[in-house]
Image (spheres, rainbow, N blue to C red):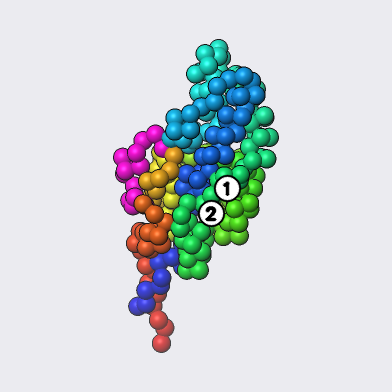
Amino acid sequence: MINIIPLNGATIAFDLDGTLVESAPDLIGAVNATLISEGFDPLAYEEARPFISRGARWLLQRGLENAGMHEPVTHAAALFRYFLDYYSAHIADESLPFPGAVDALALLKEAGAKLVVCTNKPTDLSRSLLIKLGMAELFDGVVGIDAVTAAKPNAAHLIEAVNAVGGDLARTVMVGDADTDAGAARAAGTPLILVDFGYTEIPAIELAPDVLLHHFDELVDACATLLKPVEITCLP
């Protein structure tokens, strides 16, 4: 029997914001530009950062609530187009890959893994961000909230992302930063790696990941450990 490298043919699914990319400066900047355009005070960066996984609409609502606006949900929806236009134009002004992320992705790809982005961010914005950061070519697919039947934490998002790149769910690892990622992985029955430097209201360790990642230097070994080696019989 020969052990095949665990990563060869495996699928590694990644959340984007707060997992691969420190995108908070541009996301919060776009939310605040939208609020300021209406005469409202901006959100404090440290207040807003943990809630990025809830999405830009929620952050807009938070800013409007802070301003005492009645019906913040309705008003946030009306402002969302302004946010999208501003964010699209400033999507990578300050956003950067987390340290070690690009090298870790390249090593996974070199080892034969399929890489897919599984994000609640719209697909076009996700691709735009990855292109501007020079990361797009590392991925076999990008599957945003608009490309699936149900978004994370529903298992369908992760399952459909894996299917989109011809992967095998039984040989998939989910890498994320927040409860939406944990929920999708658990619902789909895949191993879960969470980073401890992302955007989450609940500390990542409390979401009980199989591995808690402190730096991307640890990612390749973590994925290999979680994926059982495939054994084949050598024919005479």
Instruction: Determine whether the residue tagged by mark 1 lies in a helix, strand or loop.
Output: strand
Q: Residue at x 50, y 45 (%)?
A: 22
Position in image of residue 31 (x %, y %): 58, 30
Instruction: Determine whether the residue tagged by mark 2 lies in a helix, strand or loop.
Output: strand
Q: Residues within 10 Å of mark 1 (few under 14, many from 20)?
A: many
Q: To which quarter of the image does residue 87 belong?
A: top right
Quarter that holds the C terminus: bottom left
User: What's the magenta region?
Assistant: 200-213
First of labels 2, 1 by sequence position: 2
Marks 2 and 1 close (CB-CB < 8 Å): yes
Q: CA distance from mark 2 to mark 1?
A: 7 Å
- Answer whether residue 211 is magenta in the image: yes
Position in image of residue 179 (x %, y %): 41, 38
Quarter that holds the N terminus: bottom left
139 lies left or right of 186: right
Considering depth in this image, is 55 or 23 the residue closer to the camera?
Answer: 23
Q: Is residue 210 visible?
A: yes
Q: Is residue 168 visible?
A: no
Considering depth in this image, is 98 or 186 the residue closer to the camera?
Answer: 98
Q: Residue at x 59, y 24 (%)?
A: 35
Q: Residue at x 68, y 35 (%)?
A: 85
- Answer whether residue 207 is magenta in the image: yes
Q: Residues within 10 Å of mark 2 (few under 14, many from 20)?
A: many
Kind of residue sitting beneath label 1: Val
Above-or-below relation of 49 to 41: below
What's the mark number on residue 143?
A: 1
Position in image of residue 204 (x %, y %): 35, 42
Q: To which quarter of the image does residue 170 belong?
A: bottom left
What's the mark number on residue 116?
A: 2
171 lies left or right of 70: left
Kind of residue sitting beneath label 2: Val
Position in image of residue 75 (x %, y %): 61, 19
